[in-house]
Amino acid sequence: MNKFFRFAGHGFALAAVLAVGSTVGYAQDPCEDFDGQAAVYEKFTANMAGDLAKRKVAVTAGKEYLEKYGACEGSKDIAAYLKTNLPPMEEAIKKQEAAETTAKLFERYDAGVQKRNYDEAYAAGRTILAQYPDNLNVMLPLSLIGLYESYDKNFKYNEDTLKYARQALQMLKSGKEATKKNKEGVPVYGVFQFERNKEDAISELNYTIAYILYHVKNDKKGALPYYYDVAQNPGALREEPRVYQTVGAYYLENAGKIGEEIAKMIEELKTITDEDARVAKDAEIKKRIALFNGYTERALDAYSRAHKVTKDDAANKEYKAGLYKTIQTLYERRFDKKDGIDAYIASTVAKPMPNPTTEVSPVAESEPATNTTGRN
């Protein structure tokens, strides 16, 4: 009985081996799987001219065909066709996917700008500019948003605004051409509420940088060259009085500091008894007064220009009157008289505006003439 079971076990094992051997021995040759070849190739041809999703199916089918049947003698023509055409099909798919992704980014950016959802505008804009760093239509709005938001005490966009404004300004000054025109046929940059012609774009970019540096960053000296650029070149903000008023305020602030120094030095002079020391201190005071005069005259120049470009209308009446009052105060302090203010303003604005980045020249007081004859 034991022998029977022992031999029975061997019989089952042998049958299993034979079964496996039979399966392996009779597996279908892929090159003879004509139905399979036809099905895969038909899947390729049915989808190759379709939309993006179908073309991706076609590429997958083509790769499957090459993997399974590419070495078959009867499939060599189809295999050669697929080897030639699959790579450009894949490349076209990648380009279309990238284009669709970019299109969605532009849609997101446009919606952010139009709806003033500036978080979205900057998020999409940064990604777009990483791919297309010279796209001024995208960059210009990102260069100006911070200015308008700063008027409402929202400073969160200022760092990005300054970065993009400097880049945009450099590109425009280097001759970057516009890619579109407005309805009047004028080349323009930017989109929607931030669309500008070249002159206005440069003017507003300079003003944006100047405003943020001066009023937000408290880098007043750093703002001066940008204000000066606005004043010297054509553009929408050349006639903006606050350009000149701000420059004038810078001069006044520095004049005030010098005035405090002079007052302190005069008090020190009162305590000096040595005659030589008094003469030296007096000379030092006169130098500071001369510099004070120089800053005062620069301030008069700037405020005179602000007054000149301010419109004579009801909306600006009070503002213009305030500018004139400041000019009166400075004029009387500087020249110790009240008459001749209007003539002074007219002659001042007829001259070139002093560059505020240059050193202020001292203006010494005229010394009384010395009587050498002994006569009164």
Image (cartoon, rainbow, N blue to C red):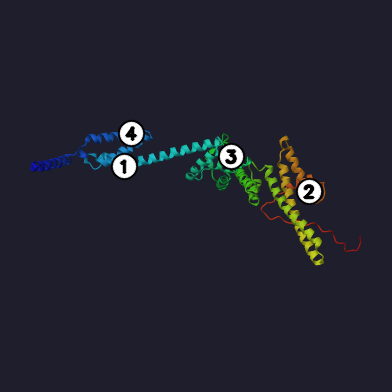
- Give the spatial CA distance, label 2 vs label 3: 39 Å
Mark 1 vs 4: CB contact within 8 A: no
Specify which label sits upstream in the sequence, 1 or 4: 4
Mark number for residue 331? Answer: 2
Q: Residue at x 48, y 39 (%)?
A: 105
Specify which label sits upstream in the sequence, 2 or 1: 1
Q: Nearer the viewer, mark 4 or mark 3?
A: 4
Name the image quarter holding residue 172: top right
Specify which label sits upstream in the sequence, 2 or 3: 3
Specify which label sits upstream in the sequence, 4 or 3: 4
- Give the spatial CA distance, label 4 vs label 3: 46 Å
Q: Nearer the viewer, mark 1 or mark 4?
A: 4
- Give the spatial CA distance, label 3 vs label 1: 48 Å
Quadrant, the C terminus: bottom right
Residue where numbered disc 3 is placed: 196
Secondary structure, mark 3, is strand
Q: Nearer the viewer, mark 2 or mark 3?
A: 2
Find residue 59 and report its horizontal and vertical position in percent.
Answer: 33, 38
